Image (tube, grey):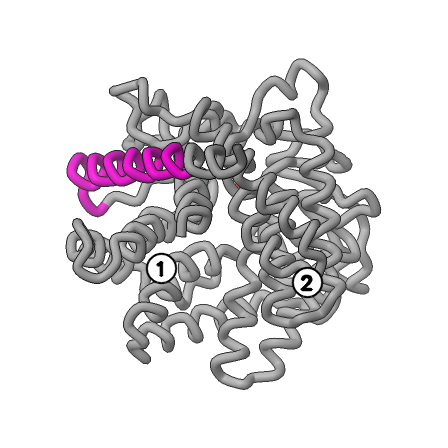
Amino acid sequence: MIHFEIESDRNVFEDALAFAHEQVKRLIERHPDYYPIYTKDGKWKHEGPAWTHWCDGFLPGMMWLFQRRAGPGGADSDFWLEQAIRYTKPLEARKQDRDVHDLGFVFLPTYYRWYQKTKDPAANEVLIEAGRTLALRFREKGQYLRSFVAENSLFIDIMMNVGLIFYAARETGDRKLRDIALRHALTTRRFLVRGDGSTAHEGIFDLETGEFLREATHQGWRADSSWSRGLTWAMYGFSTCYEYSRDPRFLHTAEACADYYITHSPDDGVPPWDFSAPLESRKLLDTSAGAIAAAGLLRLSRLLHDPIKGHFYWCTALHILRNLCQDYLAKDDKKWEGVLKGGVYHLHKNLGVNESVMWGDYFLVEALEHATR
Ligand code: GLY
């Protein structure tokens, strides 16, 4: 019975990956060299604002995953390698981008995978420089990497990027870099992760003293609510921190976030856009948070010392993936250009609401690739 379930999951996941291949091929044929963020009525190309420039790594990131999956000599392997390089190269200049806190999102799905495949030192140099650039956002007063919005602002999302600094520190042996990554993660853990495992989106600090002042949000319902994507960024990001540091505090934090996610999500594991929004508003789901949760739980399950809990996280990830694939793929809507429907980018700005979002498609593909590897 269990065997049957695993085999049927495999078929569902392989079909979903095949669909993602098709949609990405279609996108690059229709809009070559374009890096979308979110769809409007299912179409990637539109004039809607970006709010912030953080998503360019996700499209080539999917191509690197397709390439790895195809394997050497596999069908389409050369095609995906060529496309992955073509879409990755133009990102190099972002290694000096001081305007965003998102360099991990840009470089880990792209240059990191390129380097893993080729061991070309030039690719590693790009990663290291990007990690050093990101570390320049560190504020001694307050002990955090400042967000793109202001000097006094710390975002939970930065936990997904801090891995790039850990990586650069490891590759160079630079202890100061590692220290910045550790201190940022400890500050985030202390002020943005609550006792019940939920997370605040943003923390505001006193610029003079570095004192933490209050919780805040941009994309969540309220300052004291739990924006579901932020929670999944934390779950995944603290797992990465633990992988690099082996500091058990980060593992416990990732588990606390995962447990909050699991206990507060509906049965199918696909969460509302904000766990604390009023009942009516909670009908709006964010499938991208579901995809990130699945990808994060698969990673976390490998890190736990307790095999039973690890197995539980692994099975929960498969459960979420199964439901995403069965209920939210855009397969039956021939005009829809994304892979996963039902993502939410920025509800208050009305950007990408109930649409496909590039990171939702990317983390879905990452989780599917991991689960079927
Ligand atoms: N700005 C990152 C996010 O929307 O999750």
Q: Nearer the viewer, residue 187 or 94?
A: 187
Q: Quadrant of residue 197?
A: top right
Residue, disc 1 = 110
Residue 147 in picture, x, y percent from top left: 59, 54
- Location of residue 297 in the rendering, given as x and y in whole percent from the top left corner: 59, 48
| Residue bearing mark 2 | 185
- Is residue 40 placed above or below 310 in the rendered structure? above
Q: Amino acid at mark 1?
A: Thr
Sort mark 1 into few (<14), some (14-19) or many (20+) by Cα contacts within 10 Å: many
The three-letter amino acid code for the residue at tag 2 is: Ala
Q: Which mark identifies residue 182?
A: none
Q: Disc 1, ligand 1: is the CB inside 8 Å?
A: no
Dominant SS type (magenta): helix
Q: Which residues are magenta?
A: 10-33
Which residue: 34% across, 70% down? 115
Residue at the spot 73% in from the left edge and 28% down from the top edge: 276
Residue 28 on the magenta segment: yes
In front here: 42 or 339? Answer: 339
Badge 2 marks a residue whose secondary structure is: helix
Q: Position of residue 110 (x, y in %)?
A: 35, 59
Compared across the picture, whether 67 is left or right of 262 comes to left
- Tell me which corner region of the image, top left, top right, bottom left or bottom right, holds residue 123: bottom left
Residue 1 place in picture, x, y as percent: 52, 32
